[in-house]
Amino acid sequence: MIFLNLNWRKVALVIIAGLLPLLSINMEQKGRETDWIKQPFQLVSGLAQDLFFNFSYGVRSTTAHYLNLINIKSVNEQLSESNDRLKTELMLLRELELENNRLRDLLQFKQKTKMEMVTARVVGRDLVPDYNTLTLNKGSDHGLKRGQAVITLKGALGTLLEVEPQRSHVMLITDRYSVIDGLVEKTRAQGYVEGNGGSDCSLKYTDRNIELNPGDLIVTGGLDNVFPKGFPLAVVEKVENKAYSVALKIELKPIVEPNEVEEVFVVVNSLGEDLSPPVTSVTTATDQPPRTE
Amino acid sequence: MFIGRKLVYLFGLVLIIIFLSAFQTVFWFQLLGQLAPPLLWLCVINYVILARREPQSLVLVYLLAIAASSLSSISIGVFLTVIFIYFWIVVLFKDNFYIESLSYFILLNLGGSFLFHVLFYCTSRLLESNPTQILFFDRLTQVLLTPLFSIPLYWLLKKWEKYTKAPEIYMDTARYEYE
């Protein structure tokens, strides 16, 4: 319908379109209820929103997870590095503690005894396996001489074989040329401890009739005035008493393991030190009171 | 100049053998305890026997053996006797069969370390009042380890020869010529 050159149909549509928002505002002021016209759309829009929300949540959580992993990895690396460093420090501290304990024991031993001793460190061993010797880091410049005894806290190690100005070689008691006088601690029977060239030694020239069992301790005899008397030498491993043999065949295992020795004492002067346990007095017939009748 | 180069070569060899012996007696012992070390000094001696003519190589080998023995309580008489016999056996072998190669050097060290132990054991039994023991596992370990360690030593000794321009070179089996 065209009147006054206006298409009134179009004008009516515009007016209705303009009034609708005003009507909806009015309806909202009354009750705040969901507009009926929106409800079908709300269902679909809700689904669409859920979809996008889930998707974005997934993206966010994956990103956060990934970022966390990177962070965790970096923290893990730092902690691992720190852990390794602390483990190394702990190991060093343990070593220092062991060394400290060892040195304290050495010092206490040195203070208790009247022997004149020089401490030395084991630095090496012999070039060929046929000679059981160790190299020390002290020599004639420190007062050492050939033939002096070398001991550790546990027991006797050997004697000085060669002495140079700054180092010396110790012949272990297991060396095939080593001979040291020994005593069976229990029975005080004498003999000679000779090395076999391997990792053990033997007790020779003992009385055939002595009582000896595996586990018995052999100590230094002190006859040569090189070793202090009564110092542990070796432990009996095996005793063989053959009918046709003149003496017992006694195999010994040294008290001191050469592998485990780090610091030693070289006895410059034993001063007659006797480390044997004190002998308890024995009652004799003359000590008994006379009988009265 | 010729004499100078020879002296430098000789001095270097002595230092090398002392250094290797110290490694064997101190470093190896400190790290690995009682595990028998390879006979590094024997590799140097084997190389000298291969690379030098007989009269002078024997003197050189003696000198190197004395240098190595400074780190041991070994009797010089027994040691040089063993080295003397060892030297001529290796020379005999070399004169009949020689290939200038690393493989040959490795094989020589394998056989040589075994031969040395056998000779030492026999000589000790004959000459010493208290002879040595068999020490099977220690000797076996040394025989097996020595050829392995001879590989870098071959390279080192070759480099030293090249560096000092040592005058003697070997042409083929049993024949030598001075450059």
Image (spheres, coloured by chain):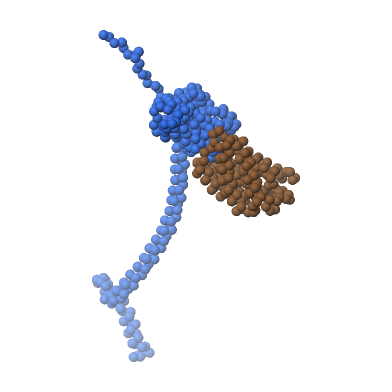
The residue positioned 43% from the left and 31% from the top of the image is: A244
Q: Give the residue furthest to the right.
A: B1
The image quadrant where one finds the N terminus of chain B is top right
Residue B55 in percent (x, y) is at: 70, 43
Q: Is residue A193 left or right of residue A37?
A: right
Q: Give the residue furthest to the left.
A: A31
Q: Give the residue furthest to the top.
A: A293
- The answer to whether residue A289 is visible is yes
Query: In the rendered view, would you say A68 is above or below A258?
Result: below
- The answer to whether residue A109 is visible is no
A113 or A192, which lies in front? A192
Residue A281 in percent (x, y) is at: 37, 19
Q: Quadrant of residue A186?
A: top left
Q: Quadrant of residue B80?
A: top right
Query: In the rendered view, would you say B119 is above or below A53?
Result: above
A286 or A115, which lies in front? A286
Query: In the rendered view, would you say B144 is above or below A268?
Result: below
Total labels: the figure holds 0
Residue B161 in percent (x, y) is at: 67, 48
Q: Colour of chain A?
A: blue
A162 or B97, which lies in front? B97
Q: Is residue B83 left or right of residue A266?
A: right
The residue positioned 24% from the left and 71% from the top of the image is: A31
A267 or A91, which lies in front? A267
Residue A16 in percent (x, y) is at: 31, 81
The residue positioned 28% from the left and 76% from the top of the image is: A40
Q: Colour of chain B?
A: brown
The residue positioned 41% from the left and 61% from the top of the image is: A66
